[in-house]
Amino acid sequence: MSPGKVCLLFCVLLARVRAPSEGPEKRWLVDDMNGMSYVCPRGGSISVIVSQFNNKTDERVWDFACKATFRGIINCSWTDYVNNFDEGINFSCPSESLICGVENLQLPKRKDRKWKFYCCGKYTVCYANCAWTDYVNESKEYFSWLVPKGFYLVGAVRYHDSNSNKRRWQYRYCAMFPTVLPTL
């Protein structure tokens, strides 16, 4: 194969694995000091979370990817905000549901965010083998976390230290199985 074709093949492969979003200019969900929102396409759940601290704006930018999860009718709803400004988060979706979207809010002159989650599920599934990650980041460092194969994102913890403005994240993930209904 000629060097030109090898280079072209490499570029095509690199473009396909560049995830979660396309191109550096479209990669980050910039929350423009007001907030940001991301929802998976219907039937999907969040499978990748990427975040980077921007020292110029003193803010985090985020990116997400989803995986196909549900077929048929699903029930979805947004939570209320699960934290107040300058507080931590300890959240899990209700049973039988997964995190399929996130939204946050920042008010002018606030250096923190309030978060809500979009949970979707079916009454015919249940969780099993749930676990929490260790913290996936230090205060202002980049992180990329992939939900393990065969598991689904169901919860999030954010440690928040108001004095140092330190925020660290953990995620809860579970396997999902069909609910066995009793026969009559």
Image: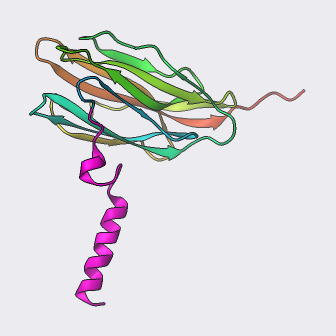
Vertical arrangement, residue 136 with respect to residue 69, above or below: above
User: What's the residue at 29%, 47% (across, down)?
Assistant: 27
For this view, does 32 lie left or right of residue 129?
left
| Viewer-side residue, 80 vs 155 | 80
Range of residues picked out in magenta: 1-30
User: What's the residue at 90%, 26% (across, down)?
Assistant: 184
Q: In which quarter of the image is the N terminus?
A: bottom left
Residue 163 image point, x, y percent: 11, 11
Q: Say whether residue 64 is magenta.
A: no
User: What's the residue at 23%, 11% (across, down)?
Assistant: 86
Q: Say whether residue 9 is magenta.
A: yes
Residue 157 image point, x, y percent: 34, 22
> How many numbered markers are drawn?
0
Vertical arrangement, residue 17 with respect to residue 69, above or below: below
Residue 143 image point, x, y percent: 24, 39
Chief SS of the magenta region: helix
Q: How is the image coloured?
A: rainbow
User: What's the residue at 49%, 46% (across, down)?
Assistant: 67
| Viewer-side residue, 89 vs 33 | 33
Write down the quadrant of residue 12 in the picture: bottom left
Residue 155 image point, x, y percent: 43, 26
| Viewer-side residue, 64 vs 26 | 26
Residue lying farthest to the bottom in this orientation: 2
